[in-house]
Amino acid sequence: MKKPDFTCAEYRKEMILVQLRRKFSHADLSPDEKQALKKEIDQLEIELDIH
């Protein structure tokens, strides 16, 4: 059996990142909410090494 290229934790983080990006681009957010989401997105991208 082939070993996966990523772990379940990494997959979970990627799915969280997808949802955060979707919320960031589609929701009517206040500037503070957008800034908080952007910070969270940036952190996940660093953790996943996809920045």
Image (cartoon, helix red, strand yellow):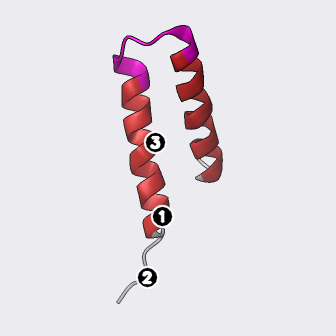
Identify the residue position indicated by label 1 in the image.
9
How far apart, in angstroms, are the residues tagged by discs 3 and 2?
Answer: 23 Å
Q: Is residue 8 left or right of residue 31?
A: left
The residue sitting at 42% across, 75% down in the picture is: 4
Percent position of residue 36, x then y? 58, 25
> 32 or 43, which lies in front?
32
Picture quarter containing residue 31? top right
Q: Amino acid at mark 3?
A: Leu
Circle 1 packing at 10 Å, graded few (<14), some (14-19), many (20+), is few
The residue sitting at 43% across, 23% down in the picture is: 24
Looking at the image, residue 11 lies above or below residue 16: below
Residues at discs 3 and 2 in contact (Cβ within 8 Å) = no
Percent position of residue 42, x then y? 61, 35
Query: Which mark, by number, is residue 17?
Result: 3
Taking the magenta stretch, the answer to whether it contains residue 29 is: yes
Identify the residue position indicated by label 2 in the image.
3
Sequence-wise, which precedes: disc 3 or disc 1?
1
Circle 2 packing at 10 Å, graded few (<14), some (14-19), many (20+), is few
Quadrant housing the N terminus: bottom left
The residue sitting at 57% across, 45% down in the picture is: 44
In this picture, which residue range is highlighted in magenta? Answer: 24-32
Q: Amino acid at mark 1?
A: Ala
